[in-house]
C-alpha cells in the first residue's frame, strides 16, 4: 500500500507570502490544493477528482481575492467538487487543517457539502438548486438590510436540470445584481462528454435570452478570470453568469478530457479513487508543476508530508447487484422488443452499458433531466412500449415524483429502477444516501416496490417486473458491492407479498430486505444466539409495499416479539406496512413490535462507520433487540 | 335560476357543411364551441373559461384541418382548457355529444384530461409535462415503425416550469421534427398578467436558443394560423414551436384581457363558473357574433337547445379555511418581521392577497416554478428569515419534494402551506385532488404535518407553525368551503400529537381530521347510533405524523374496534401512523383495526358524487363500519 502525501499548512502560508502577482500566486495555490484534493480522495477511497480539478483555479481566485466583504458568500451548486473547496478552506484556515485527513469519514468532511461544516453555506449535491438558493439568500439580505454578494458555482451537466432554467427567470426580472453564477464548463459530465449526453447547444445565447449578463473566460487563465470578474462590477441591475471554459481533470495530463479517445464511452475520473499507480503518477505530475513554478519564482520546492493510507476493508467475495441487474435486463430485452431503457447520465452506475451496446436504438439518454425522462417514459408507455427508467434512487424517486404519479394515473406500465438505494455507501453524504424513496412512492397507485437481497434474487425480481406482473414497478437496488452472509436456497422462488426465513428462531422475528441490512440481521441473529441465548428468526421480505396477509399471519404467529428493519427512514418504509398489518390481524397475543431503521438524516462516513452511527450494524442491532426484549412493557 | 343554452350537434353539422373557406368555417366553428364551453362550465359550476376561449381557434383548426393522418396526435399540456377540447370533440363526434352535459360529473368529462376519456391522448393538468410526453410518443413511433406527428398545446404561464425547458433540449439534439408545440400565449396566468407574475422575457429568442424552429402568429387569425402551420412542413429535422398570440377570454368582450384595468390585481375569469348575469351577457355576445357570421354567409342564425341548470347544493354557513388562514398569517406576520411569504401564481387561491397588500416587500411571487420557490425559501431560511411557502398541496408536496428534503437537511425552519388538499373539490380531477402529500412528505425529518378541521383550529395551527414550534411544518388545508357538522369547545387547545373526542361512543373509535372527512365521520356516528344502535367515538386528530403515545393508548383503551379515516390514499396517511402505533402499544386486547381512505385514483365529479364513489360519505362510511364490525374475524 503506497503512502500518501499532502501539502502541509505551512507550505500554503509560505506560498501565499511569496512576492508575486495575484494571478500567478493563485495558480500555484490551486495546484497545491490539487495535491491535497488528490490526497483526500485517495485516502477516502472515493470522491470526484475530475470536477474538483476543473474548478480549483476558480475557487482559489474567489477565496484569495474576490470574497472580501464580510457578507459575501460562495457555494458550489454541483457539490461533488467538495474536496476542492475543502482543500482551499483548510489551506486558508477556514476549516481546521487536520480535517483533510477525514474526507468522507464520520464527523469529518462530508462527500457533498453540508452546512454542518464550518464555512459551508448551503447543502448541495442534488443538482440545479444553486441559483434558487442564492436568490433566497439575497432576499434575506434585502429584508434584513444586509450587504453581500452571492457567488454560485455550477456544473455544466447540471444545466440539464429544469430547475436551473426555472431559477434564472426571476433573478433577471427582479434585477438581482447580487448574484454571480460561474459555470465550470469542463464539457464532461458523469459518464462522458456533455455534447454526447445531452448537448447544451449555444449556451451563451441561451443564458443571454434569459436576461442574464453573460461573460466567457478560460477558467484556468487566472489573470483573464480576474479581469472578467472585475469587469462584472460595472454591470448594473443584472444578474451575472460567467461561462468558465475549463478542462475536466485539469492538472494531470492523463486525467484531462483531451486524453479521452474518440471511441471512449466513459471518462474514467469522474468519481472513485485512483489506484496506487495512478495516484503516484498524478502526484508526480502535480509536484513537478508546482516545483517548476516555485523554482521560477526563486523559491524552494514544495515540502510534502506523508501519511499512511488507512487500511480499507477487503471484500472476499462481494456480490454486485447492479451488475446482476445489467445482465438480467439484457436477457429480458432479448425476449421483449417493447422494452426500452431510459438513462439520466448514469449509464455506468445504473448498469446500462450492456443494454446500450446491444440495443442502441432502444436506449434513450436523457441527460440529468429526470422529470423529462419520466414523462418521456410515460408518453412511450401510452403508445405501447415498456419503458424502464433508471437513475439513482434519490434522484428518481423524488424530483420526478409528480411525473411518476401522472404516469400512474394513465394506468400504463412503467418500470423504475433506482440504484444506490439505502444508507451505504456512506461516503457521498445525505444527498445521495436514499432513505426516503419507499415513502415518497408509497402512495403511487399500482406501483409494486421490491428490493432484492442478492444476485440471484435480482434475476427473479427483474423477471417479475418486466415479464410477470402487469403492474408498474419500482425496483430498489443497493449499489455498493457487499459480502452477503446468507444464501437463498437453490429452489428459491419469489412470490408476491411473501418472504423466506433465512435463520430460524423462536424468541423474536425480524423482517428485513436487501443485502446490507438483511445481512446485518443475519449476523445479529448469530450474536444473539451465541451471546444472549436468544433465538431471532430472520425473514427476507423483498416486497416493500405488498404483503400476503395469510403468509404474514403465519410468520408472526406465536412469536413474542416482532422487529422490522428498514434500510430507509423508519417512517414510511416496509416497517410501517408490516406493523399496521400486524394491527389489522385478528387474535394478536400480547407481543412486542418495534420498527428499526434510519432515525435521522444519514451521516457521512465509511460504510462501517455509518451503519454503526445509525445503530444498524449487527452489533448495535443485537444490543437494541436484547434491550427492547428486556425492557419493561410501557407505553 | 337561469336556464342554459347549448349548440346541438346538428347545428355543428350544418355549419361544417356550409360552402365557405376553411379559415372562416373554423372561426365560426370555434365560436359555436365557445358557446358550448360556456355552457359546460356554467352547468358544472366550475372550469376555466379564459384559457378555453383563448385556444379555441387553434384547437378547432387542428381538429378540422391538420390532424389528418391516422397516427397524428394532439393533446393539451396545460390541461385546464379541457372544456374547449371537449366542445370540439363532442361537436365532431369523437366523443358522445351528450357528454357535454356531464363536465366534472362522475363518469362524465373530467376537469382535466384523462386517457380514460375517448380521444384524450395524455393525462395533463400538472404543468410542464407535455413536450416530454410527446417525445416519448415519437420514440414509440420510431421503435414500432409507426408514422405520425404530435401536436402539443401549452400555456404561457406553464413555461415558467423548469420541466418545459428541460424537455426542449433532447428534442432539438435528436432533431425530432415530429413534434409541434403551440404556445397559447394569452398573456394572463392564474392570477394576473404573466409579465407581472414572472415575465417570460424574449420568448422567441429563448426558444430559438434552445434549437427549436420558432414561428409566431396571431392565434385568432385562422388564415394566418393555417399558413404558419402549413409553412412548418418545409422545416426539416427540427422540432417546431408556434407562439400563438392569443387573448385570454377571447370572444366575450368583458372576459378579455383588454378589459382588465391597470390596477386590477386579478383576472376574474381564470377559473370558476359565471354567475347568471355574467352567463347571459356572455352568451348574448357569442350568439350575436355567430349569427352575424351566419347571416353574412346567407345562412340561418344558430338554433340553440335549452337545458335547465341542475340545482347546486346551497351551503347555509360554510367555513372557509383558506380565508381563516389568510387572516391568521397576516396576524403572525405583524408580530414577526422575519416572516416572508412565497407564492407560485396562486395568491388568490392560497389566501395571500391580504399578506401581499400589507407586506409587499415580504411577498415573493415566484410564478409557476415550485422547485425554484422551495429552494429560494431554503436560501432565505439559511440567512435568518422564516419563509412560508404556498401552493396547492398537489404541486407543493411532489414536484419540489427533493428541494423540501434538501432544505430539511440544512435543519433550518421552513413552513409549507398546501391548500386544495384532499379528495374534494372533486371537479378538477386527479391532477389537483391531492391525496398523496402525507406520504410523499412523511420521511422528511423534522417536518411536522397537521391539518386543521375548522376556522378556529386554523388559527391555532398557524400560531403553532409560525410562533410555537421550532420544527419545520407542513400545514395541509382543505380549500373547498364546507359546512361543518361539529364545533370545537370554546376552550379548545391544540396539543401536539393529541386529539379531541367530538362524539362519544363505546363500540368503536374513528380518528379523522380536516373538515370534510371528520365531518362525514361525525355524521356517520349519528347514523350508526340512530339506525344501528352502535356507539362510534369520533376523534379529531389534526396531527398527521405526530402522536402522543400515552394519549393514544388512552384513546383506544377498551374500544373493541379502531378505525382511521384519511382524506388521502389509504397508504401513507395518518392511518398508517396510527395502526403501527397500535401495534407498538403493549397489552392490546383483541380488536378490529381498519384503515379507511382513498383506495384508488380520485374520481372526478361533484363533491357528493366523489365522496360517495370512494365510499367516504357518511352513508357509505357507516355501512362499511357496520359490516366490518359484523364480519367474522379472519386474516
Image (cartoon, coloured by chain):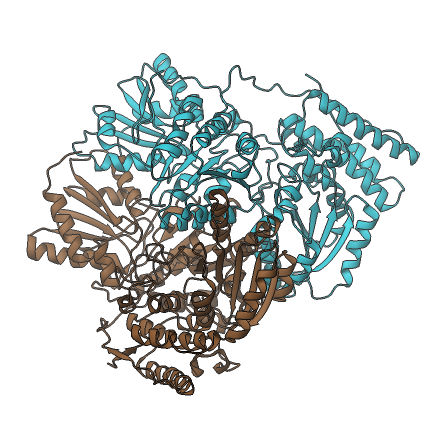
Chain colours: A brown, B cyan
Please tell me whether residue B10 is drawn above or below residue B617 in the rendered image: below
Q: Residue at x 44, y 71 (%)?
A: A56
Query: Relative to the observer, which residue lies in front, B51 or B629?
Result: B51
Q: In which quarter of the view is residue A581 placed?
A: top left
Residue B388, horizontal then vertical, whole percent: 46, 38
Query: Relative to the observer, which residue lies in front, B416 or B622?
Result: B416
Residue B523, horizontal then vertical, whole percent: 41, 18
Quarter holding the N terminus of chain A is: bottom left
Query: Relative to the observer, which residue lies in front, A576 or B474?
Result: B474
Q: Residue at x 32, y 79 (%)?
A: A275
Report the residue that reaches farthest toward the front.
A19
Quarter holding the C terminus of chain A is: top left
Horizontal relation, residue B323 to residue A122: left or right: right
Is residue A337 visible to the viewer in this orientation of the structure?
no
Q: How many marks?
A: 0
Is residue A607 visible to the viewer in this orientation of the structure?
yes
Q: Residue at x 72, y 53 (%)?
A: B242
Residue A547, horizontal then vertical, whole percent: 31, 45
Horizontal relation, residue B399 to residue B513: left or right: right
Amino acid at each position: 500500500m503506497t503512502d500518501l502525501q499532502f501539502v502541509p499548512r505551512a507550505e500554503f502560508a509560505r506560498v501565499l507570502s511569496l512576492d508575486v502577482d495575484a494571478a500567478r500566486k493563485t495558480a500555484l495555490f490551486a495546484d497545491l490544493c490539487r495535491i491535497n484534493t488528490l490526497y483526500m480522495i485517495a485516502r477516502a477511497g472515493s470522491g470526484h477528482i475530475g470536477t474538483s480539478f476543473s474548478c480549483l483555479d476558480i475557487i482559489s481566485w474567489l477565496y484569495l481575492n474576490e470574497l472580501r466583504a464580510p457578507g459575501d458568500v460562495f457555494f458550489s451548486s454541483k457539490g461533488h467538487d467538495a474536496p476542492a473547496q475543502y482543500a482551499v478552506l483548510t489551506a486558508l484556515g477556514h476549516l481546521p487543517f487536520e480535517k483533510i485527513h477525514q474526507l468522507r469519514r464520520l464527523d469529518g468532511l462530508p462527500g457533498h457539502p453540508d452546512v454542518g461544516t464550518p464555512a459551508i453555506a448551503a447543502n448541495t449535491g442534488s443538482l440545479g438548486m444553486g441559483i434558487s438558493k442564492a436568490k433566497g439568500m439575497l432576499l434575506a439580505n434585502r429584508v434584513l438590510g444586509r450587504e453581500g454578494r452571492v457567488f454560485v458555482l455550477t456544473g455544466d451537466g447540471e444545466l440539464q436540470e429544469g430547475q436551473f432554467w426555472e431559477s434564472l427567470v426571476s433573478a433577471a426580472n427582479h434585477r438581482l445584481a447580487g448574484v454571480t453564477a460561474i459555470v465550470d464548463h469542463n464539457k464532461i459530465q458523469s459518464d462522458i462528454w456533455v455534447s454526447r449526453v445531452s448537448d447544451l447547444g449555444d449556451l451563451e445565447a441561451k443564458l443571454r435570452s434569459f436576461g442574464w449578463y453573460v461573460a466567457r473566460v478560460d477558467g484556468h487563465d487566472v489573470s483573464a478570470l480576474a479581469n472578467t470578474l472585475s469587469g462584472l462590477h460595472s454591470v448594473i441591475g443584472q444578474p451575472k453568469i460567467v461561462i468558465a471554459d475549463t478542462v475536466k481533470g485539469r492538472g494531470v495530463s492523463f486525467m484531462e478530457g483531451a486524453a479521452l479517445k474518440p471511441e471512449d464511452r466513459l471518462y474514467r475520473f469522474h468519481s472513485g479513487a485512483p489506484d496506487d499507480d495512478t495516484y503516484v503518477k498524478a502526484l508526480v505530475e502535480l509536484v513537478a508543476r508546482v516545483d517548476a513554478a516555485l523554482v521560477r519564482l526563486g523559491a524552494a520546492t514544495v515540502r510534502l508530508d506523508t501519511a499512511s493510507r488507512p487500511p480499507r476493508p477487503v471484500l472476499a467475495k462481494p456480490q454486485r447487484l447492479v451488475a446482476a441487474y445489467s445482465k438480467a435486463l439484457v436477457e429480458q430485452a432479448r425476449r421483449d422488443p417493447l422494452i426500452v431503457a431510459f438513462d439520466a447520465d448514469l449509464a455506468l452506475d445504473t448498469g446500462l452499458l450492456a443494454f446500450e451496446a446491444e440495443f442502441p436504438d432502444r436506449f434513450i439518454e436523457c441527460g440529468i433531466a429526470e422529470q423529462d425522462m419520466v414523462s418521456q417514459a410515460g408518453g412511450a408507455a401510452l403508445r405501447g412500449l415498456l419503458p424502464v427508467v433508471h437513475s439513482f434512487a434519490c434522484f428518481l424517486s423524488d424530483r420526478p415524483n409528480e411525473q411518476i404519479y401522472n404516469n400512474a394515473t394513465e394506468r400504463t406500465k412503467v418500470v423504475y429502477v433506482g440504484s444506490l438505494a439505502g444508507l451505504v455507501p456512506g461516503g457521498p453524504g445525505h444527498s445521495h444516501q436514499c432513505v426516503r424513496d419507499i415513502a415518497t412512492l408509497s402512495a403511487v397507485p399500482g406501483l409494486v416496490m421490491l428490493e432484492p437481497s442478492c444476485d440471484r434474487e435480482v434475476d427473479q425480481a427483474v423477471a417479475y417486473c418486466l415479464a410477470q406482473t402487469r403492474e408498474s414497478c419500482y425496483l430498489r437496488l443497493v449499489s455498493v458491492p457487499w459480502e452477503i452472509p446468507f444464501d437463498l436456497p437453490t429452489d428459491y422462488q419469489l412470490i408476491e407479498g411473501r418472504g423466506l426465513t433465512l435463520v430460524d428462531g423462536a424468541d423474536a422475528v425480524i423482517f428485513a430486505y436487501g443485502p446490507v441490512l438483511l445481512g446485518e440481521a443475519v449476523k445479529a441473529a448469530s450474536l444473539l444466539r451465541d451471546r444472549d441465548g436468544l433465538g431471532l428468526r430472520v425473514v427476507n421480505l423483498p416486497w416493500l409495499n405488498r404483503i400476503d396477509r395469510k403468509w404474514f399471519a403465519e410468520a408472526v404467529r406465536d412469536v413474542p416479539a416482532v422487529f422490522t428493519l428498514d434500510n430507509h427512514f423508519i417512517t414510511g418504509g416496509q416497517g410501517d406496512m408490516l406493523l399496521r398489518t400486524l394491527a389489522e390481524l385478528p387474535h394478536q397475543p400480547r407481543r412486542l413490535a418495534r420498527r428499526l431503521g434510519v432515525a435521522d438524516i444519514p451521516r457521512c462516513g465509511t460504510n462501517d462507520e455509518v451503519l454503526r452511527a445509525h445503530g444498524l450494524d449487527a452489533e448495535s442491532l443485537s444490543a437494541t433487540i436484547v434491550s427492547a426484549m428486556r425492557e419493561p412493557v410501557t407505553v
